[in-house]
């Protein structure tokens, strides 16, 4: 239906000319000779936009605009002023009173039509947005589920009124992640965080978890929470939204498999634990997870995945005795309560039987699939009489079993629980550190062994946590890689190291090569080269002063992709070094295939090079290979003059270690660079 435009002008000829032009461009028109008539026509609700002349005899355009704005907001009825006045003060006055735009006389038809079209488009966009918001508000108000929407980077979160009322909160309770995560039952919190992380890392298709959460009246209610992440073009999640359902008094059985759900399983487990309190190893909980189940959904679809879960439930039920309890907890996780054990070996025997039974091929479409399952076991009895603890311990044992690879069985012990708690604390604090960028850099000099001159600095990340103290990179970097946090950390290291190196140059200090370690996980990013190039350009940093250190695993994990990325970095001018050479694959074949400039000999070979003939032979062989391939060598772990002499004798050019300098923080490295700049002190050697 054509938009209707109201033309308000006391000059009849002007009105006729505008009507003719607008109708020729498929608009309907109405006209008014004065302000009061315009207001009355606008009240009919048939007008989509008003062209309003400023100068009129009875009520001028400004007064008409005021009256119209009392009736219609600026987003509902666009008003474009028409004026022959060129003074900016009149235009400013009109806009301040609520005009959407203005046109000056004599009217340029093309300009007028463009501005009319723009304002009508904005009006429709506003109307569509308002209707969408109203639909969402109505859906949220009418839904029995509580809705949530979580911005992952900023940690901002929205909870619908139903979500808040479910826990006893008022509508005006501030939206904060703490009123969600801090209220989850302590025994469920780690599992919920794991479920969220598994979805964020694309291990599961969506987030789904059943847990207890604290009501404001002091009691816990059972809820089922589900959600899905929104990802950017790189597949990185930046937002997550979903719903929460109160299932405290809902059905206790899984709709898909017909098996008991978590709440009913815990109820049965609690009764069993209380009945046998004081007896050693009278029951056991087996926590099962199907390995690589996501591949079935991805390859054959969710219907096939559901069929597999139904068949797994049937086979598991055939494995247990009538007095035992089987439950589907969520997703591809199952649990078994094995009652009245005659021996603790009964649980292990059952676990092995389950693995054999599930390994028997199952027909899915045109394919026969064998399921592999990891199992964690926790025993109940004299030391454990709480159902929550038993299930949590079994889950901890499962986590430990999966860390050793697929298809493993592990039994919970006390040390495992302490390690799990410590791991959870470390993960939580590391996430906070990445959010707040609570890291620092230090730099260890790399020295020419013959001249003792500085040739480079290796940037090393440090993390000091308020609760955990100083955490070694060998501890937190692998966890960051596992949690998908390494990208943000690597970006920070790259930007910070180059920024500091550039600041040294501006202070008149010597330009020096800076080595930065790249995680193997970084090579999964399609924009890695663009990211590095962007930082170098923004900071105006010479690429030839950048040394990219990689591990051997980068070259082996994705050979073709790694070759292309390293070639682009090398062509850019950066130096490529292999770190910790000799501790990984140590394949000589890839040394010829990749654009590698330098090999770093791992310190494990250097530390005992004087006394250990094997270490000496390996080190000499690495140096010889590097020289034959026209590569330079850096030896790590140089701690004595004897080390220096031996390395020089076999042809090693550069060294790095405590003999020259410990890693220096940002202030210390500036003093170090100033000291070596002095003509009277050309040698490079820091005091130990």
Image (cartoon, helix red, strand yellow):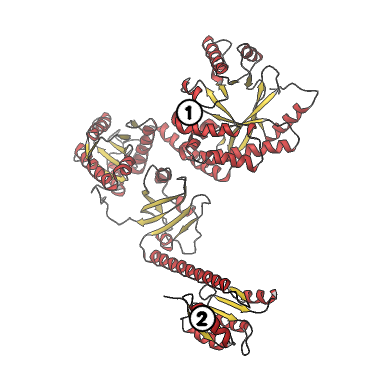
Residue 162, placed above or below residue 492: below
Please identify the quarter of the rendering in which residue 629 is found: top right
Q: Residue furthest bottom?
A: 58
Please identify the quarter of the rendering in which residue 571 is found: top right
Q: Is residue 19 visible?
A: yes
Of the two numbered discs 2 and 1 on the same chain, state the one appearing first in sequence.
2
**Which numbered disc, 2 or 1, marks the residue closer to the eye?**
2
Q: What residue do we see at 59% from left, 42% from top?
A: 534
Image side of residue 423 versus residue 373, left or right: right
Q: Which residue is mark 1?
A: 555
Dot 1 alpha-carbon crowd within 10 angstroms: few under 14, some 14 to 19, many 20 or more: many
Q: Position of residue 165 (x, y in %)?
A: 42, 62
Q: Nearer the viewer, residue 351 or 235?
A: 235
Dot 2 alpha-carbon crowd within 10 angstroms: few under 14, some 14 to 19, many 20 or more: few
Image side of residue 195 versus residue 325, left or right: right
Q: Residue furthest right?
A: 680
The disc label shown at residue 20, or none: 2
Q: Position of residue 417 (x, y in %)?
A: 41, 35
Q: Locate the N terminus by quadrant.
A: bottom left
Residue 306, placed above or below residue 563: below
Q: What residue do we see at 37% from left, 40% from top?
A: 392
Residue 333, placed above or below residue 415: below
As measured in the structure, the alpha-carbon distance from the residue carrying label 2 to the one carrying label 1 is 72 Å
Q: Position of residue 201 (x, y in %)?
A: 43, 42
Q: Nearer the viewer, residue 277 or 23?
A: 23
Image side of residue 219 versus residue 307, left or right: right
Q: Locate the C terminus by quadrant.
A: top right
| Mark 2, secondary structure of its residue | helix
């Amino acid at each position: 239906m054509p938009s209707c435009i109201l033309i308000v002008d006391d000059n009849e000829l002007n009105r006729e000319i505008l009507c003719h032009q607008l109708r020729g461009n498929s608009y309907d028109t109405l006209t008014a000779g004065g302000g009061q008539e315009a207001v009355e026509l606008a009240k009919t609700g048939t007008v989509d936009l008003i062209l309003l002349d400023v100068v009129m005899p009875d009520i001028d355009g400004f007064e008409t605009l005021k009256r119209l704005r009392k009736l219609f907001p600026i987003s509902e009825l666009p008003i474009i002023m028409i004026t022959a006045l060129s003074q900016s003060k009149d235009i400013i006055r009109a806009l301040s009173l609520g005009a959407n735009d203005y046109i000056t006389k004599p009217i340029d038809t093309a300009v007028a039509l463009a501005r009319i079209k723009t304002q009508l488009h904005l009006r429709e966009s506003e109307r569509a947005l308002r209707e969408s918001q109203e639909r969402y508000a109505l859906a949220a108000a009418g839904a029995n589920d509580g809705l949530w929407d979580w911005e992952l980077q900023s940690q901002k979160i929205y909870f619908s009124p139903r979500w808040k009322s479910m826990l006893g909160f008022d509508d005006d309770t501030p939206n904060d992640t703490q009123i969600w995560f801090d209220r989850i039952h302590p025994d469920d919190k780690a599992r919920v965080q794991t479920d969220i992380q598994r979805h964020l890392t694309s291990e599961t298709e969506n987030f789904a978890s059943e847990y207890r959460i604290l009501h404001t009246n002091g009691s816990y209610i059972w809820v089922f929470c589900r959600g899905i992440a929104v990802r950017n073009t790189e597949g990185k999640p930046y937002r997550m939204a979903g719903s929460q359902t109160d299932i405290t008094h809902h059905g206790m059985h899984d709709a898909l498999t017909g098996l008991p759900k978590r709440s009913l399983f815990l109820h049965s487990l609690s009764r069993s634990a209380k009945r046998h309190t004081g007896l050693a190893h009278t029951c056991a909980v087996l926590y099962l997870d199907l390995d690589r189940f996501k591949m079935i959904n991805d390859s054959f679809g969710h219907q096939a995945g559901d069929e597999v879960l139904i068949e797994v439930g049937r086979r598991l039920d055939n494995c247990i005795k009538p007095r035992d309890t089987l439950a589907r907890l969520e997703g591809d996780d199952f649990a078994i309560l094995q009652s009245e054990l005659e021996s603790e070996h009964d649980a292990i025997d059952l676990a092995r039987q389950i693995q054999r039974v599930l390994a028997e091929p199952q027909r899915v479409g045109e394919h026969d699939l064998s399921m592999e399952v990891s199992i964690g076991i926790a025993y109940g009895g004299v030391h454990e009489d709480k159902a929550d603890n038993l299930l949590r311990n079994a889950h901890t044992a499962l986590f430990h079993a999966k860390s050793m690879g697929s298809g493993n069985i592990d039994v919970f012990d006390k040390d495992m629980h302490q390690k799990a708690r410590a791991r959870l604390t470390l993960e939580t604090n590391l996430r906070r550190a990445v959010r707040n960028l609570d890291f620092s850099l230090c730099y260890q000099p790399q020295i020419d062994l013959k001249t003792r001159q500085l040739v480079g600095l290796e940037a090393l990340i440090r993390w000091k946590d308020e609760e955990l103290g100083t955490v070694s990179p060998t501890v937190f970097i692998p966890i960051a890689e596992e949690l998908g946090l390494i990208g943000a950390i690597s970006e920070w290291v790259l930007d910070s190291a180059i920024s500091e190196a550039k600041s040294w140059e501006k202070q008149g200090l010597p330009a020096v090569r800076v080595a930065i370690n790249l995680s193997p996980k970084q090579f999964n990013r399609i924009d890695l080269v663009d990211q590095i190039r962007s930082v170098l350009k923004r900071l105006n940093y010479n690429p030839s002063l950048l040394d990219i250190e990689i591990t051997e695993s980068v070259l082996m994990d994705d050979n073709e992709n790694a070759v292309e990325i390293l070639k682009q970095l090398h062509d850019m001018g950066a130096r490529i070094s292999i770190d910790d050479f000799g501790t990984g694959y140590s394949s000589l074949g890839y040394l010829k295939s990749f654009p590698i400039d330098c090999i770093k000999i791992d310190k494990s070979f250097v530390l005992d090079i004087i006394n250990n003939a094997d270490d000496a032979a390996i080190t000499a062989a690495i140096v010889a290979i590097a020289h034959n391939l026209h590569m330079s060598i850096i030896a790590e772990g140089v701690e004595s003059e004897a080390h220096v002499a031996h390395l020089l004798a076999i042809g090693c050019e550069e060294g790095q270690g405590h003999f020259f300098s410990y890693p220096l923080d940002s202030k210390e490295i500036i003093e170090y660079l100033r000291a070596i700049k002095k003509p009277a002190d050309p040698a490079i050697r820091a005091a130990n």
